[in-house]
Image (cartoon, rainbow, N blue to C red):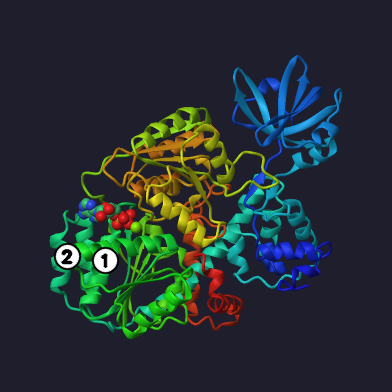
Amino acid sequence: MNLSTDVSHLKGVGEKTAALFKKLNINTYEDLFSYYPTDYIKYNPPVSFSELKAGNVCTVRGLAANVQGPVKAGRYSIITVVLKDGLNTLEAVFFNQPFIKKVIKVGGYYILRGRIVQKGAKLIMQSPKLFKEDEYAELVKYPQAKYSLTAGLSSKTISKALKAAFIDAQWGEECFPEKYLKESGIPSRKDALRLIHFPECDEDIVTARRRLSFEEFFYFIMLLRKNKAISVSTPNNFKMIETAETKRFLESLPFKPTAGQKKAWKEILDDMCGERCMNRLIQGDVGSGKTLIALLSLLLAASNGYQGALMAPTEVLAMQHFKTVKEYISKYNLCFEPVLLTGSMKAAEKKEALSKIESGEANLIIGTHALIQDRVLYKNLAIVVTDEQHRFGVRQRQALAYKGKEPHILVMSATPIPRTLAIILYGDLQLSAIHELPAGRCAIKNAVVGTSYRPSAYKFFKDQIAEGHQVYVICPKALSDEEDDGELENVVDYAEKLRAALPGVNIEHLNGKMKPQDKTDIMQRFSKGETDILVSTTVIEVGINVPNATVMMIENAERFGLSQLHQLRGRVGRGSAQSYCIFISSKEDDKIMERLNVLKSTNDGFKIASEDLRLRGPGDFFGVRQSGEFAFKIADIYSDSDLLESAGNLVDEILKDDPSLSKEDNRLIKEQVDYFFAHSELFSSI
Ligand code: ADP
Ligand code: MG
């Protein structure tokens, strides 16, 4: 079978499983192979009861001495099994699993795996999983891949399908020079895929990632270079002159722009009034005031009689920008005629917005990717500003660029990346960096703590809420799934836990799996102050501005990259009140704490990024959630920076020798690049 064969041809994959695969966008063998594990579970041999530690997920083997319950407690029906291991005892607590009563017999030996928690003076095991002896012995041998799932599907089913696919898949030829791969220690694609799904040890995962990350970087950079080739010689089709409007706006602001803002604005002015089309990136830490620069650029276009577009990665952000702009217009009497265009708008509203865009009545268009759909016709689009740009694909950026007559492009990013990497990633863009924050900001107070700190944190939430403030809590997972071992907190259960701990407090939760309209509504309620605590995944990471929120608490902080934690922290400290950030680590080993403590010692995003680079070895933290801004599927710009560099070098080498990729040696690369160009959605994540 070739790689584009439908998964329904796989042995053991029936109609039902195939339908579930489709839900995860797994249609072909290729899709299945590139459905990478999100994590690996390491099943350790059982430990003796005396070695148990609160907070850890452990496996024990013990003699069932007593089975109590079920006892009703609210929505739960609780069964407690008392296990013995020599003289020590351990209580294992099962929630809503009535069958346990039938399965576990007093006098038998059982293997249980679950999280150990402190309850009063003793340790208990919470919601454990029960294993058969021989089944567990198998699991202990190798790291077990865990996948992002949908209801009704298990990681085991995915692994089984993968095993079948490896047996009958026909692999294509190698696309990279064999010699190069050998010298760089990069395995073939087939080997890499086998290792990523079925590793026998940690090194296998590292080896696999070398190939898969390299490949991802390679094509990303290749597409960037192609983009550059197109844009580098573009003349300025929309030459502007500096108007009184932008000067007046700057002078009437209640604050003075920072030196970085001034410099960035000057560079933009020079570009837009100069001979060539602008293609510029503004890199500035969270809160450095990038929005002002965007507005100035858009205002320059509007006052020159042109249209400008501001594209945000989410509806919530687009709406927030729209609101900010409207406030600015009424406060400073700016010459903007703004319209909002998002996917979830009603048909009639959309129609009206579209007609205003086409007629030129609107000179500032704010929206999500709805802005680049074919139906949107612009009268004279002169500049496109994208906020938090990495969420958009190279192609999307290009598509929008071609809607007009090659407008100026300004992209804003809050991910500070070291210069060497920036040059590789943004070879096609001019760079403006804003290094300082506006003066007078109150520094955020930080705490890096273990899970035992939670009760104090909850009390602190209460006090802050009583003072009229709001709280964010971030969890790494959206929902619990069947294979949950309790190691990672999920938004839904956590919100429930908080409601129990903080009666009378208004708590809502938000995750990326919700409908866009629901997400927007929840965010809106939080924004208006109707919700006290918002429990969310990192969907709120980018750009959201709720100055009244003063506390950010991040659960499983050890699972996030430092840069991403820094971004999340940037959601507080936006108003005049003192703000706080609490990083909770479920593991308290020295290496993890050292890494997290970097956040306590500095608030400089560039410094944090380079520490992230230094403290994270390749493959060190496979489960670490990567910065959402650079949504590479597997590669990580920080821990894989060496691969990023070598991919950049290989791209340059190949293009130098064969700029149009027309040589036979590069045929496969060309095919792949053309394929990505034709299927922009494949690259929409980067
Ligand atoms: P980001 O760079 O993260 O997008 P924003 O543009 O949202 O930051 O700005 C954060 C806040 O700082 C806004 O409330 C904005 O009005 C304010 N701000 C921007 N520039 C300055 C400045 N030079 N002095 C004081 N406050 C500023
Ligand atoms: Mg912003």
Answer with mark 2 or mark 1, whichever residue precedes in sequence. Answer: 2
Can residue 282 be seen at all in this image of the molecule?
no
Q: State the quadrant of the N terminus.
A: bottom right
Taking depth in this image into account, of 552 and 424 the one nearest to the observer is 552
- Dot 2: within a 10 Å radius of its alpha carbon, few (fewer than 14), some, or many (20 or more) residues? some
The answer to the question of whether label 2 and label 1 lie on touching residues, with beta carbons closer than 8 A, is yes
**Residue 6 image offset from top left, x and y in percent:** 74, 72
Cα distance in 3D space between marks 2 and 1: 10 Å
Taking depth in this image into account, of 229 and 113 the one nearest to the observer is 113
Q: What residue type is labelled 2?
A: Phe
- Compared to residue 317, the image places residue 556 above or below, namely above
Residue at point 58% right, 56% down? 210
Residue at point 77% right, 20% down? 84
The residue beneath circle 1 is 295
Q: How many marks?
A: 2
Give the numbered dot on residue 678.
none
**Residue 11 image offset from top left, x and y in percent:** 84, 64
The residue beneath circle 2 is 249
Res. 313 image quadrant: bottom left
Q: Quadrant of ligand 2?
A: bottom left
Q: What residue type is labelled 1?
A: Leu
Res. 52 image quadrant: top right
- Compared to residue 21, the image places residue 541 above or below, namely above
Taking depth in this image into account, of 650 and 513 the one nearest to the observer is 513
**Label 2's element?**
helix
Residue at point 33% right, 79% down? 407
- Dot 1: within a 10 Å radius of its alpha carbon, few (fewer than 14), some, or many (20 or more) residues? many
Res. 496 image quadrant: top right
